[in-house]
Image: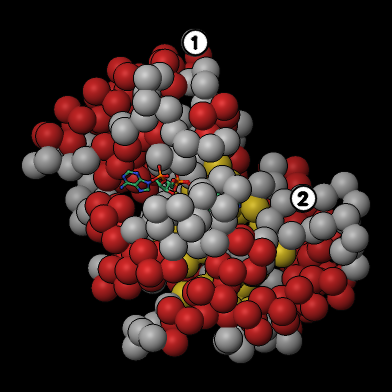
Amino acid sequence: MAEVSSETRFLHAIEMGLGAWQWGDRLVWQYGQGYSGKEVHDAFKLSVEEGIRFIDTAESYGNGLSERLLGNFIKETDQPVLVATKYFPFPWRFLRTSVTRALKNSLERIGVESVDLYQIHWPSPLMSIDRMMDGMAECVKSEMTRTVGVSNFNQTQMLAAYSALARQNIPLASNQVHYSLLNRKVEKNGLLARCRELGVRLIAYSPLEKGLLSGKYNADSRPPGTRAGIYANILPKIEPLIKLMTTIGQDHGGKTNSQVALNWTICKGALPIPGAKNIKQAQENAGALGWRLTEEEVAKLDEVSDQILDR
Ligand SMILES: NC(=O)c1ccc[n+]([C@@H]2O[C@H](COP(=O)([O-])OP(=O)(O)OC[C@H]3O[C@@H](n4cnc5c(N)ncnc54)[C@H](OP(=O)(O)O)[C@@H]3O)[C@@H](O)[C@H]2O)c1
């Protein structure tokens, strides 16, 4: 592994974070139905008490509501909280100054002077990576963010971002990508290894595969909303993996499927940021810390997940 730069080292010391897409999102997560501000506040408080202090939000989550809620929650805690947010390259925002202006707006919504990580949410055909990184560099120089990262960037795009920032002596802190026992593309295509080589922290989003890895959904009991369609093909196949996770969890004194799923991503060298809708989910997910799967267990989980993903 390359030596991690001193500015971004803190990210490598974080084992797990908390995702805040659920805070305000109605389209995928049905915010307002069965859970709302109180429940996510409880999830936040519990996570912070359990030592999970890295929160991942975005300007687009709940159209800014996620950032606003985070700002309110931060004000009510005396614990230090590390904030990561994101720039969305909408087609009408493609200038260097679009990035700095968007971060200013995020800071206002969160009510802080700077964040710890500012990320480009998705690459865009309308905005070059060089221009994006010029904007990100400006955000670091003006001290609106401590570090910068990308999200959903493939290896080529990540290397371009890395080099563009390096020209300004700024390290690329992270690449936030989809990574779970049911989505191992970044492991198979070399992105995870490349991140390790460059000292870039790989942040794993959807580490519970949007709830599937908890074991509560199957072909007969489908998740609500858009997830039912997205996962229609995979749901009938996941039973062997869920069974194995349950057995492995039992061997660790009764760890749950979600805890096994999150621990697996940590064992792989990633930083998972599971979303939680309420205190119960946050509590359970916090139990992914403080213990480790064995190498043999990771290998067995890999084998069974491969069988599902290859079918
Ligand atoms: N950069 C990007 O493009 C991108 C994309 C996606 C996500 N993200 C980030 O990554 C975070 C996590 O990803 P995600 O929200 O997509 O998926 P996830 O963390 O894999 O799944 C979260 C969902 O799983 C269910 N769940 C959570 N904990 C559970 C538990 N202990 N037991 C049972 N069910 C549980 C909840 O939904 P139900 O209760 O409704 O099942 C929850 O909303 C997001 O919040 C966001 O910050 C980033």
Query: Relative to residue 38, is residue 177 depicted above or below?
Result: above
Secondary structure category for the residue under label 1: loop
Pinpoint residue 226: horizontal percent, then vertical percent.
57, 36
Q: Is residue 219 left or right of residue 204?
A: left
Q: Is residue 154 left or right of residue 298?
A: right
Q: Which mark is residue 163?
A: none
Pinpoint residue 252: horizontal percent, then vertical percent.
13, 40
Secondary structure category for the residue under label 2: loop
Query: Relative to residue 171, is residue 294 depicted above or below?
Result: above
Q: Residue at 82% across / 50% down in the picture?
A: 124
Q: Residue furthest top?
A: 311
- Quadrant of residue 287 in the image? bottom left
Q: Few, some or many C-alpha atoms within 10 Å of disc 2 (few <14, some 14-19, many ≥20)?
A: some
Q: Residue at 69% across / 42% down in the picture?
A: 154
Toward the viewer: 147 or 60? 60
Residue kind at label 2, given as amino acid type: Pro
Of mark 1 and mark 2, the one earlier in the sequence is 2
Q: Residue at 40% across / 40% down in the picture?
A: 211
**Image colouring:** secondary structure
Pinpoint residue 86: horizontal percent, then vertical percent.
65, 64
- Quadrant of residue 98 in the image? bottom right
Q: Which mark is residue 123?
A: 2
Residue 193 appears in view: no
Residue kind at label 1, given as amino acid type: Arg
Q: Which mark is residue 311?
A: 1
Residue 225 appears in view: yes
